[in-house]
Image (cartoon, coloured by chain):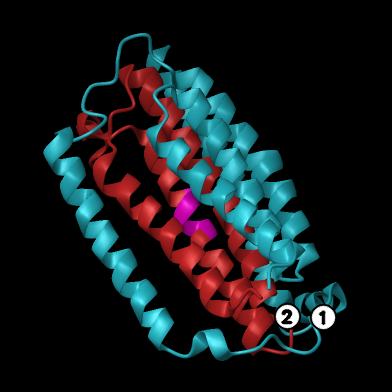
Chain colours: A red, B cyan
């Protein structure tokens, strides 16, 4: 029997992995990975709470919006990474100081 | 009592978490991108286990299909020959991060175990895709429209970024 807590634990572990990546990595691609993992962790919460606590598909609809937004965000971030790489020859976020406004 | 869904849940949890760890810790970042795709697929199968097949298929289409391939292409484009410096903050910083994140995860897990959430049973009837359709076409139709505009704007901004870069190097 899989309970709501089990899904929440999976989500929290993914959250931990994502936060760990965000604070330790400086490679821009790894940061993108971390953000995507965090978004996935949040989505698991939405669907799990929807399944266990709510009779309509409200949480699933929210996850559909979230996935679409994440795709838009990923496309913009990856475009920025490619531009930064062509200008800088590097994707270390510590070196990208001239991206400051 | 262990049944098939328990085994599937355990396996998919291992795939989702293991893929995420591999994405961050793989030496070669291309393997990291593949691990990320595996993690997305694992999360999608968790959605299947939660009786949400529409969301699961959406996740596979968008994440495993589009985002993972986009990430893989970008990784191959920006893979520089020289070694990346400063990818990790040294063994001490890494250990500090692991301890802090571990404490965060542990405290949240303990909170769940004492919250009584595991006693909550599933809803009798899982919401179907008909329900999703009614929400998307009804009260959330304006959100859908705005989301379409956001997607268009993101594509335009990605194209603009590529164009600016070309003018600068020319």
The residue under label 2 is: A57
- Tell which subunit mark 2 falls on: A
Image-based side of A3 in relation to B91, left or right: right
Residue A94 in the image: state x and y as whole percent.
Answer: 21, 33
Q: Nearest the camera: B72 or A83?
A: B72
* Disc 1 element: helix
Residue at the extreme left of the image, as rendered: B92
Q: Residue at x 32, y 21 (%)?
A: A90
- Magenta part of the protein: which range? A36-40
* Disc 2 element: loop
Image marks 2 and 1: residues in contact by CB distance under 8 Å: yes
Quadrant where the N terminus of chain B is found in the figure:
bottom right
Q: Residue at x 40, y 19 (%)?
A: A86
Residue at the extreme front of the image, as rendered: B1
Disc number at residue B131?
Answer: 1
Q: CA distance from mark 2 to mark 1?
A: 6 Å
Main secondary structure along the magenta-highlighted residues:
helix
Residue B156 placement: quadrant: top right
């Amino acid at each position: 029997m899989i309970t709501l807590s089990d899904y929440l634990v999976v989500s929290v572990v993914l959250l931990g992995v994502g936060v760990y990546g965000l604070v330790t990595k400086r490679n821009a691609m790894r940061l993108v990975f971390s953000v995507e993992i965090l978004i996935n962790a949040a989505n698991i919460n939405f669907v799990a709470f929807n399944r266990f606590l709510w009779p309509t598909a409200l949480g699933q609809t929210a996850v559909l919006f979230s996935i679409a937004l994440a795709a838009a965000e990923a496309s913009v971030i990856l475009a920025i990474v490619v531009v930064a790489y062509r200008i800088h020859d590097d994707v270390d976020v510590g070196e990208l100081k001239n991206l400051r406004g | 009592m262990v049944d098939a869904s328990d085994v599937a849940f355990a396996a998919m949890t291992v795939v989702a978490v293991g893929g995420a760890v591999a994405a961050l810790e793989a030496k070669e970042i291309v393997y990291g991108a593949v691990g990320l795709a595996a993690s997305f697929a694992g999360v999608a199968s968790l959605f299947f286990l939660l009786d949400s097949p529409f969301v699961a298929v959406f996740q596979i289409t968008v994440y495993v299909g589009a985002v993972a391939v986009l990430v893989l292409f970008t990784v191959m484009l920006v893979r520089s020959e020289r070694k990346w410096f400063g990818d990790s903050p040294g063994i001490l910083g890494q250990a500090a991060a692991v301890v802090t994140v571990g404490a965060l995860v542990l405290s949240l897990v303990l909170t769940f175990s004492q919250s009584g959430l595991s006693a909550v049973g599933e809803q009798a009837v899982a919401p179907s895709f008909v329900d999703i359709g009614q929400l998307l076409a009804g009260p959330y139709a304006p959100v859908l429209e705005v989301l379409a505009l956001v997607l268009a704007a993101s594509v335009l901004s990605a194209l603009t970024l590529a164009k600016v870069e070309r003018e600068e190097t020319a």
